[in-house]
Image (cartoon, rainbow, N blue to C red):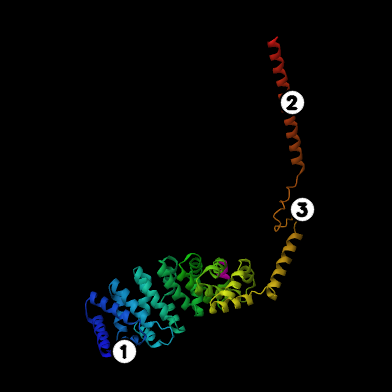
Amino acid sequence: MAETLRKEIEDHVTALKHFNAIRKQTAAKALALFAYNDAIRAVIADAGGIPPLVALLANGAADGQEQAARALGNLAYDLAYDNSANCNAIVEAGGIAALVALVDNGDARAKVAAAKALASLARDDVICAAIADAGGIPPLVALLANGAADGQEQAARALGNLAYNNANKVAIADAGGIQAFVALVTNGAAGAQEHAAAALRNLAYDNAANTVAIADAGGIGPLVALVTKGTADGQKWAADALLNLTYNNTANKVAIVCAGAIKPLVALETKGAPGSRRSAAHALQILDLADADYISYITRLKSENASLKRQLPEDDVVDLRDDNLQPPKKKRNLRDEVDEQKQAVLKRVKQEKVAVEGARDRAVEDLEDV
């Protein structure tokens, strides 16, 4: 059985090298299916399947490119993170540049398959840097912002993995990735929301500028909403993202509390999945309202508010926390008082004139009746 399988794979590899476009597409599709199996991935690589798949990816027809991207993505994927041999072989065969080009210029389905392959490849710092060097970040951000739902999800996966690299965190933010991720957390499909929240978590980790940018982009509210009503994975990643937004940023702590995060985080800590419970507990610990930084921040705001009040005339100060208070009345000057007196006199004269004319008319009517 093993020999029969090996022979079939070798036949597909031969077709990739020497047959026509349709046969190449069929062979790539078959190898993509075989590559779902952990053990068979090594057989495909040993049979020399990676270089011709990269060649089809770079120079094939649209359908062939899509299937080659799927096959390479499956060959690179490994949940245990120990499939470095296949990843390195794809890189050495020129796969990164071909995949980036496909995300940039391929049709919709090819873009999805290429983004998924890049997500699988972006498992170590060297390859993450290589994808960025090949210009991979801008087209992935474009797919994130403007692609169909499955394209957005795979772009979010790829960019989230790329964001483990510190230089890439900056590049993704510069390419507009933060705004696109916030929009996806807000309105994306469930899978896309999960990966977008995970990416925001990675972008915020140990990057002060990104923690500010995510808050400025309106990211805190949607993340709190995802903690409240998201899927189990979405809740976990959103809680982790909120946690990372608080590091050395008291303003974000205050904003997260004001966005109503405490109640859903407490619920998640109590009733969520085990991983989500740990994330929620850690976030609640950092958001502790007795935190010295928080108290210091609130104290400074109160001091600034008091200073502003002292700079205004007493009659112009309104406590904006009291919904029943009315704005201060506009101060009157001498011209206003003179104008009001003139208007009062004119009004009285008009009223007297109307009264006299009415009396005269009634007198005439009485004479006519005699």
| Other residues around mark 2 within 10 Å, as few (<14) / some (14–19) / many (≥20) | few
Name the dominant secondary structure of the magenta segment.
helix
The total of numbered circles placed on residues is 3
- The amino acid type of the residue labelled 1 equals Asp
User: Which one is in front in this view, the residue at disc 1 or the one at disc 3?
Assistant: 1
In the image, taking residue 339 as reference, residue 173 lies left or right, namely left
Determine whether 269 is above or below 38 in the image. Answer: above
Residue in the foreground of this view, choosing between 130 and 244: 244
Is 247 above or below relative to 327?
Answer: below
User: Which sits in the foreground, 339 or 144?
Assistant: 144
Q: Which mark is residue 314?
A: none
Quadrant containing the N terminus in the rendered view = bottom left
Asked whether the residues under the numbered discs 1 and 3 touch, taking CB atoms below 8 Å apart as contact, a structural biologist would say: no
The image shows residue 363, relative to residue 130, as above or below, that is above
Q: Where is the C terminus found, in terms of image quarters?
A: top right
Q: Is residue 168 left or right of residue 212?
A: left
Task: Give residue 300's quadrant in the image.
Answer: bottom right
Spot occupied by residue 81 in the image (x, y as percentages of width and height): 44, 85
Residue 5, image x, y percentages: 27, 87
Check disc 2 and report its element: helix, strand or loop. helix
Q: Residue furthest bottom?
A: 3
Q: What residue type is disc 3 on?
A: Asp
Q: Which residue is mark 2?
A: 352
Report the Cα–Cα distance between label 3 and label 2. 40 Å
Q: CA distance from mark 1 to mark 2?
A: 111 Å
Query: Between marks 1 and 3, how big is the CA–CA gap?
Result: 84 Å
Q: Which residue is mark 1?
A: 46
Say which amino acid is labelled 2.
Glu
Residue under circle 3? 315
Q: Is residue 295 magenta?
A: no
Bounds of the magenta segment: 212-216
